[in-house]
Image (cartoon, coloured by chain):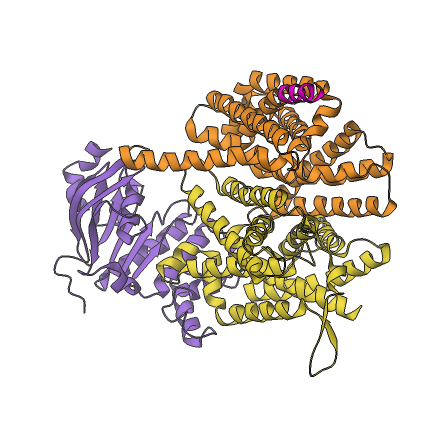
Chain colours: A yellow, B orange, C purple
């Protein structure tokens, strides 16, 4: 139970912090797009190495995400294609190619698309490794998750001002020679890594739920971006613990239940906030 | 002989289905609601799974009715959230997608756990299975698609006013609100019928791409609808032949890939054309 | 000291084409220091296009823009730009004060915001009379207040050249007066202002130099001369 909660907390913290970077730049649906695109990358990687455990699969997934954004940038050049349409076309391209490759070339291999899209957190708890000096067993997924989370925290800490400048007013950041393209590349790479690493545990649609919830609570109500990050992570982790408890109690898939719980609470919060603001009982204000 | 009759049935269905999807695609693309189509197709999952759970019937019509209700609810939910919540880009769409699809996953898990007979049909909706369309009720799909297409074509001038200038439209069309609801319902019906062939995961791309291709070629809304219908029909026809020759591939990716490749090809052609001639 | 023998801004053979349409044929002009220059013209004339080309946001087909006889990359720190805020997310968690801090040259040095940066930001906010409401989240401000904050951000940079895109659009009279007064004081120190402006009636009060644009540069020079020779009448 402790290891389950720890894994859930790490995954939620990672994607909350990633989402705080991704959503203002690329929009909330980009994570769903990345998840679908990775199917194409995994299938393409499998074509090269014919093994599900090769690092080429991982590289293929990352590469496909970059390629997807390349296609989006290419399509955006047309005046008649909106950003949303370009995203929809790009991820559908890679997803369709992935399904075709899997159907034609990988039928005998257990490349379970349900796992890619839906995840199974219960399964990854069985995939453990023993730590050499501490003689305790931990889920294998903790290693890459911790590394990514640490990297993200370092970026948020050391480049906080640059991030705020780019997220709020990219044009101005360019004028000040802050180079938004570097942040964009980093965000794409981190998102690709984050989704690939946590794919076996939590599907991409559940990640979307985790990412969007803090915006329901705090967007336009908080004065400072670093406070937004702290409140989002704390609140998401606490709510996800409740969601996990509900999932275990009702014997439901954990990832989907946690995401559903988070988004439901977020939606209820919005309704309550509007109701109370309208009747002027209190003004929701974290200032 | 049987295979030929199935093929003929699928070809006829493709014609009508393609024309309906083409109309809806043109409308959604110009209204900049292409991604809403994608969300609504994902959101049909809980309706399908819970309809199966409550009725224990694998009748496609019942499942599709359930899917339609949840897809329509997701569209209304999106419009409501967009109005009340200050969210960043696509936030309302993401919320709608996440809530409904995760609900569908939970429904699917419950269905699997209860080991109800005939639950395999629920899996087909992920990537589509054209053969299901040929199995039964084909004539209903054809009639519905035909009526929908005619309705879309007849109301083109209303669509133009509604999409271009909503404020002006409210002053000229007395029941504009009801028109919008009707178009939303028709979009849902088109998505639900189409997703049997294309699947919930790729139906969104079929709502976006034919209209986008048409928009890149013409600036006239009428011509755009016509071109979108042509592209969509071809996509379905290619899907039919793809499934006929490669029976182990789900029909969804085959149908979805043609308009995507056409879209990218048209864009490349446009760039080459403007660089050679200097005109846009 | 920068060598501005030709002028603070020198445009050489600038030609701009957008979507296959030529906005400007090869054109050359210069803007001296110590002036408040308005870029004016009817709708769709290319006013914002000219400004964006000068700062490098749009690549010209030919020609170049020099600032103090240098390319913009060498002197960007002395140039402050206030563009139209169409793409800004007003719900972003940032206060007016933090926004103005961003404008100070030393802002991106170090991990934390230094007290020197904060002091400079406060000074800039004082100039635009926004110091008391600087702790409000950006979305809580009115249209005029938002514009003043963005201009305060530009002031905080202590530039020698201000480039503004319709700074007076959609703001209240009080905000307009504050901004106009500051621009007048700004050029008195030998600096310059170039601004896209749409209102003929207030142009004479706020500016003393004009670039008249209508599918090409029609006039560059003192505003009083343009009025006397009725250039506006011909162009509009």
Side of C232 where C19 appears, left or right: right
- Residue at 22 percent of width and 59 percent of height: C71
From the viewer's side, name the closer residue of A107 and B83: A107
Magenta span of residues: B2-13
Instruction: Reply above or below: B86 against B122.
Output: below
* View extreme (left): residue: C5
Residue B210: x and y in percent read: 52, 30
Residue B162: x and y in percent read: 54, 26
Residue C194: x and y in percent read: 26, 52
Instruction: Reply above or below: C38 against B64.
Output: below
From the viewer's side, name the closer residue of A113 and C143: A113
Residue C192, by quadrant, is bottom left
What is the chief secondary structure element of the magenta stretch? Answer: helix
From the viewer's side, name the closer residue of B197 and C218: B197
- Residue at 60 percent of width and 68 percent of height: A149
Quadrant position of the C terminus of chain B in the picture: top left
Q: Is residue C148 visible?
A: no
Residue C104: x and y in percent read: 38, 67
Side of A275 where C218 appears, left or right: left
């Amino acid at each position: 139970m402790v290891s389950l909660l720890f894994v859930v907390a790490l995954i939620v913290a990672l994607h909350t912090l990633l989402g705080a970077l991704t959503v203002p730049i690329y929009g909330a649906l980009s994570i769903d797009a990345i998840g679908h695109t990775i199917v194409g990358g995994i299938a393409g990687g499998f074509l090269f190495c014919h093994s599900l455990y090769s690092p080429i699969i991982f590289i293929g997934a990352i590469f496909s995400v970059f390629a997807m954004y390349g296609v989006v940038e290419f399509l955006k050049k047309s005046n008649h294609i909106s950003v949303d349409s370009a995203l929809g076309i790009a991820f559908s391209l890679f997803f369709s190619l992935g399904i075709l490759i899997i159907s034609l070339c990988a039928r005998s291999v257990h490349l379970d698309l349900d796992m890619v899209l839906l995840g199974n957190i219960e399964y990854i708890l069985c995939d453990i490794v023993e730590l050499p000096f501490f003689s305790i067993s931990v889920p294998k997924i903790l290693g890459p998750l911790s590394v990514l989370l640490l990297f993200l925290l370092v970026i948020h800490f050391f480049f906080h001002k640059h991030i705020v400048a780019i997220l709020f007013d990219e044009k101005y950041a360019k004028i000040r020679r802050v180079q938004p393209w570097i942040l964009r590349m980093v965000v794409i790479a981190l998102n690709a890594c984050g989704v690939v690493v946590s794919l076996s545990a939590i599907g991409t649609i559940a990640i979307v739920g985790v990412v969007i919830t803090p915006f329901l609570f705090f967007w336009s109500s908080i004065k400072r971006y670093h406070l937004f990050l702290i409140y989002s992570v704390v609140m998401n982790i606490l709510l996800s613990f409740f969601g996990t408890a509900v999932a275990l109690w009702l014997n439901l898939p954990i990832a989907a239940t946690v995401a559903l719980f988070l988004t439901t609470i977020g939606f209820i919060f919005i309704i309550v906030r509007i109701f109370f603001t309208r009747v002027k009982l209190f003004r929701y204000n974290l200032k | 002989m049987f295979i030929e009759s199935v093929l003929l049935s699928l070809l006829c269905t493709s014609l009508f289905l393609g024309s309906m999807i083409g109309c809806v695609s043109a409308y959604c693309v110009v209204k900049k609601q292409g991604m809403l189509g994608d969300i609504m197709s994902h959101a049909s999952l809980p309706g399908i799974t819970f309809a199966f759970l409550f009725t224990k019937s694998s009748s496609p019509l019942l499942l599709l009715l359930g899917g339609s209700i949840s897809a329509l609810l997701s569209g209304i939910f999106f419009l409501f959230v967009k109005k009340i919540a200050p969210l960043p880009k696509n936030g309302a769409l993401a919320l709608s997608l996440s809530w409904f699809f995760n609900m569908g996953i939970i429904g699917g898990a419950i269905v699997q756990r209860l080991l109800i007979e005939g639950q395999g049909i629920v899996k087909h909706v992920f990537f589509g299975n054209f053969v299901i369309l040929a199995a039964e009720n084909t004539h209903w799909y054809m009639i519905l698609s035909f009526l929908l297409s005619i309705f879309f074509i007849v109301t083109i001038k209303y669509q133009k006013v509604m999409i271009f200038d909503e404020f002006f439209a409210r002053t000229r069309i007395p029941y504009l609100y009801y028109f919008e609801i009707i178009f939303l319902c028709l979009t849902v019906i088109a998505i639900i019928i189409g997703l049997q062939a294309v699947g919930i995961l790729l139906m969104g791309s079929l709502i976006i791409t034919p209209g986008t291709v048409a928009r890149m070629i013409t600036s006239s809304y009428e011509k755009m609808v016509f071109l979108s219908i042509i592209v969509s029909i071809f996509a379905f026809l290619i899907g039919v032949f793809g499934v006929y020759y490669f029976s182990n591939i789900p029909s969804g990716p085959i149908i979805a890939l043609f308009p995507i490749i056409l879209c990218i090809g048209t864009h490349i052609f446009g760039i080459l054309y403007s660089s050679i001639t200097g005109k846009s | 000291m920068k060598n501005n023998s030709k002028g603070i801004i020198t445009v050489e053979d600038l030609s701009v084409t957008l979507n296959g349409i030529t906005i400007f044929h090869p054109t050359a002009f210069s803007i001296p220091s110590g002036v408040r220059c308005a870029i004016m013209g009817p709708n769709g004339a290319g006013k914002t296009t000219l400004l964006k080309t000068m700062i490098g946001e749009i690549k010209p087909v030919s020609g170049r823009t020099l600032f103090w006889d240098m390319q913009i990359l060498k002197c960007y720190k002395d140039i402050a730009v206030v563009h139209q805020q169409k793409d800004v997310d007003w719900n972003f968690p940032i206060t007016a004060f933090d926004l103005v801090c961003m404008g100070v040259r030393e802002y991106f040095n170090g991990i934390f915001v230094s007290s020197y940066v904060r002091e400079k930001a406060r000074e800039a906010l004082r100039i635009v009379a926004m110091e008391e409401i600087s702790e409000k989240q950006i979305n809580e401000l009115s249209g005029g207040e938002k514009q003043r904050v963005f201009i305060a951000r530009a002031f905080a940079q202590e530039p020698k050249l201000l480039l503004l895109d319709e700074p007076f659009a959609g703001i209240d009279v009080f905000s307009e007066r504050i901004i106009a007064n500051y621009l007048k004081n700004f050029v008195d120190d030998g600096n310059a202002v170039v601004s896209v402006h749409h209102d003929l009636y207030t142009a004479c009060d706020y500016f003393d130099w004009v670039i008249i644009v209508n599918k090409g540069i029609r006039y560059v020079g003192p505003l009083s001369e343009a009025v006397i020779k009725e250039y506006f009448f011909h162009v509009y």
